[in-house]
Amino acid sequence: MIKIPLLRRGEPYTSLDVALIPHHQTREMFVEVSQANAGLIRRDLRDQAMARGKLARFSTTELVAMCRHAADHFLNDTLLLGAEPQTAEDYVKHVSATTGLPLVMVRKNMQKIRSMLAEMGDVLNGLTRNIDSEVLDRGFGEVEGHAVSFFPCAESLGVVLPNNSPGVHSLWIPAFPLKIPLVLKPGSAEPWTPYRIVQALIKAGAPREAFCFYPADHAGAGEILRSCGRGMMFGDASAIGAWESDSRVEIHGPGYSKVILGEDCVDEWEKYLDVMVASIAENGGRSCVNASSVWTPAHAEEISEALAERLARIIPRAADDEAAQLAPFANPEVASRISQIIDQGLAEPGARDVTAAHRKGERLVSWNGCSYLLPTIVHCENLAHPLANKEFLFPFSSVVNVPQRQLTETLGPSLVVTAITRDPELVQRLVSSPNVDRLNVGPVPTNQVSWDQPHEGNLFEHLYARRAFQRAVSF
Amino acid sequence: MSTAEATLETNIKQSRATLDTWVREVVQWHFTSETGCTFWLDYAQTLSFDPRKAIETYEDLSKLGPFQDEWLRGGPVRRWVPKGYAGRPVYTFETGGSTGVPKSRINIEDFRLDYEAFSATLPDEFFPKGTDWLSLGPTGPRRLRLAVEHLAQYRSGICFMVDLDPRWVIKLLKMGQPKMAEQYKQHVIEQGLTLLRAHDNIRCLFTTPKLLEALCEKVSLKKLGITGVFCGGTEMTQQFHRFAVEELLDGAYFAATYGNTLMGLAVHKPRIPEDNYAIIYYPPLPRAMIEVVDPDNPDRVVDYGETGRVRLTTLTKEFFMPRFLERDAAEREPPCELYPWDGVRNVRPFAGFQNTVVEGVY
């Protein structure tokens, strides 16, 4: 069996507490993941300044160059996984084995991570708004003729990671060239990606002390977030609750991303069907940037019928099928529970599972030994319906009639909004809305992410603060 | 069969015979009207047999059926006081109680006897007689409070006390106040540190796994002069054991224990490399017995190495508690040279209670 150790300041450590993760299809135990006890985490994190000191010896330019090299290592090289070698193809199969993601989706996510690493210079420019890297290295300098000074708010960034999709790991990587050491708690079924990214960076010359990798239980996750000066937490609504009021922790909860059609474009909705389909179904519908609602001032029934017809073509395929668009659930009980929640919602008046008439059989299917939820479009008569604003880990979307004048006041927190409108007044209202985290104007799929843009907060601003700075002339 | 195996076999049979003899004596005591307690005397009236005649061996205790958790919740607590001990000072100790009525167990001398027996397992080199102790952990209604102090006194020491109220910690966690729980823990640790720094003669420490971790984050036990640590009170994992030995203890002896108010104290088998830091406990036979049973059929003791639910039996003249299903799971461990009777390996909360047990909070 494959064994994954902890990394304590970059050094492998095999714990006597292990979690056994099964293969999603065979249910046979596939990997043994060492688990960190909370006391061990706390003890290691007593001296965070040492790790930061190791990173501070490098210039930002040097660290960005390491990221560029790491991009290639991550994508192509054989890297260490514990004591064993892991090829790039092994990695793809390993991720698929424990998460259910088809190989083709893992490869696409791999490319996302590669591009984030390879284009780290641009990413940092986006996050820092083009501050010269020498200013970052020195901590003070001039930007457009004004004195600036920045200081780190933390000695390390603790990150509690999810299982849903490897691409999400791109979000924490910029902390490395920003000289903030990383303390990572992987998702229980997806230790592969953060471990491989760390190994790629170490191979590229990164000081190993800059990385801690602690698979752990909830207590361990809490310990990481408490012990690090800054944190990022991914999780569902129930998991993030305890940390929502802690400003040190950036929360990445459900996305509730949406496609919104303006009155000016809605009569041409068929032109935008591809954007809606991609927004809902790309990456198996597993990302927080996938749309879970389409809001439209008219034609809701026709749009939902057209979406249902298109999405009903997506069927389960083998993990190695290049045409696979759907991921099975690694835990069949989760699929069953989600389907039950949807059915309970449909029992409330005012909603209809439009896909039911287009697909053969039930929403929850068992195929090739795996459990799948087939794409589901629910037409809701209004926003009050319990399914109107729900997010699930598969291609699911509501289509709701929402008058344009009510759009922004009823929007609620939305990670991505794709607004298909040329109406300057509507665009301005969305621009002004504090509920919109990422805004795409025009037919841009919600899942099309530009990494030089902030995502649920700007990582640079999360890790660094600006201070007033003056220096006497000729001193 | 090697000589060692033959000796072990003989010792196993002997310990079983001792247990059976003791069972007869204890049953005789508890079901005789002059010596028994009201609870068991009343219980005997509901049986179709006389336990004093029908129960001759440990196995025969099954005839009494399982001991019900609820019997210990609420009063009158005097129904548990054996008539044979009438007029003696009675303590009552509690377990549980973070919500609802705690379980109560009466005590007269048992805590002293148990801890005197435990004292014999502590190496004098690391727990020097005549040196003082710090007890850093739950006190209040728990028997630990008096028991650790008695242990110190029995070894000619004086015990300093710092209290931690686990019920409050559990409440804080249930209220979603982990930071407050952490502050409370630090408050306890600071008091302990103050005592350790002020009293040079403290060499021995009782504490819980979580408090040991927290204490060792602040100081080196070696620098404070601590040479022996008696640790218990909550679940202890194999990894914690290794972590403690390799990174926390600075060479101090680690005496892990498993026990509770109801049973007494099970001692840890001394560490050998082959056990790879597994936590292996043996009960204080014949005063108590720990078994591992099939959760779906608690009458079946599982095979050696097999996982099951922990079943406790307390057999003292003060307290008789046959076949009590504990909220723990473990593997059944075979007898060893030092303890020629069944033990348990790697005790942890029983999965069937995962949703209700808040474990390891202190």
Image (cartoon, coloured by chain):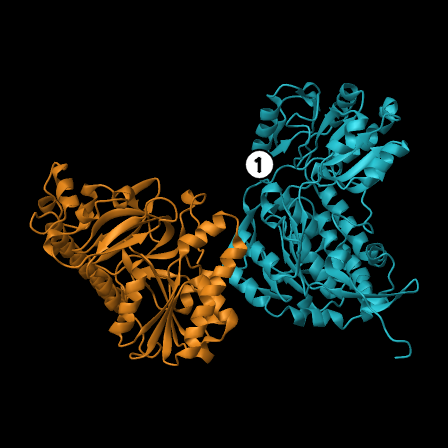
Q: Which residue is mark 1?
A: A334
Q: Position of residue B352 (x, y in %)?
A: 41, 43
Query: Which x, y percent locates residue A321?
Result: 72, 38
The percent coordinates of residue A470 (x first, y second) are 84, 70
Q: Is residue A30 above or below residue A471?
A: above
Q: Residue lying farthest right? A: A145
Q: Is residue B164 visible?
A: yes
Which of A77 and A95 lies nearest the eye of the viewer? Answer: A95
Identity of the residue drawn at 57% across and 55% down: A222
Say which colour chain B has: orange
Q: Residues within 10 Å of mark 1 (few under 14, many from 20)?
A: few
Location of residue A316 by image quarter: top right
| Quadrant (top left, top right, bottom left, bottom right) of the C terminus of chain A | bottom right
| Residue in front for this viewpoint, B321 or A425 | A425
| Picture colour for chain A | cyan
Q: Amino acid at mark 1?
A: Val
Q: Is residue A236 left or right of residue A433?
A: left
Q: In the rendered view, does B90 fall on the left or right side of B268?
A: left
Q: Chain of mark 1?
A: A
Give me the residue at 11% from left, 47% from top: B31
Residue B178, compared with residue B119, is above or below; it is above
Q: Is residue B344 left or right of residue A42?
A: left
